[in-house]
Image (cartoon, grey):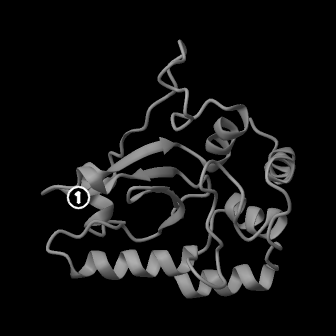
Amino acid sequence: MTDVNELVARVAARPRRVSGPLPPALSPEEVAAAERALGFRLPPLLARLYQEVANGGFGPDYQFLPLTGEGRTVVGEYAAERAASAREEVPYWPEGVLPVLDWGCGMCAAVDCRGEDGTVLLFEPNVLGDDAADAWFLDAPGLAGWLETWLTGTGWYREDADEDDRAAEQPVPWKEAAARIAGAP
């Protein structure tokens, strides 16, 4: 089991060593305002990251988006994805799933806020067809484990993953995708 306090400290230390200072963290009031705007609460670890580490700028590759503020934010991206999905003949974005990190080429890491553990999902719209569920993959059962793969350099997304004898765990189809997109609880 991951010590969450230690994990938060390690997440905070990594970008400071690699890329310099992070944006200021958010206050509990700012996180609460974001939760009101979203209409649901963040998983506890995700809220702590934004309050204790920074308002974005940490995490793998392109790094976490800011939760709130100027420019692209998690709150803004969630609202945009939900609105765009609602206009489509085949909706594709489930309620309560926050896009937190942009992988590029339309792909993103998203956190399912319906559970305390913050399941991490991969949205891969480049495979989007008649069934929107095909674009959703389970990346990690919880945010803590997903962050651990980043910190230890064992994530599927690292550049040398194909060259490694130890195959990085690849995301698998998200079994709940179709029901969640359809709005089932």
* As drawn, 103 above or below 83: above
Q: Residue at x 80, y 79 (%)?
A: 28
Identity of the amino acid at label 1? Ala
**Residue highlighted by disc 1:** 132
Q: In this rendered view, identify the residue nearer to me: 74 or 117.
A: 74
Q: Residue at x 80, y 45 (%)?
A: 7
Q: Residue at x 80, y 47 (%)?
A: 18
Residue 91, x across and y down, in percent: 23, 70
Residue 154, x across and y down, in percent: 62, 29
Viewport quadrant of the C terminus = bottom left
The answer, for residue 7, to whether it is visible in the render is yes
Residue 74, x across and y down, in percent: 56, 73
Residue 29, x across and y down, in percent: 78, 85
* As drawn, 123 above or below 37: above
Circle 1 Cα neighbour tier, 10 Å, few/some/many (<14 / 14–19 / ≥20): some
Residue 167 located left or right of residue 83: right
Viewport quadrant of the N terminus = top right
Picture mark count: 1
* As drawn, 96 above or below 143: below
Q: In this rendered view, identify the residue nearer to me: 45 or 129.
A: 129
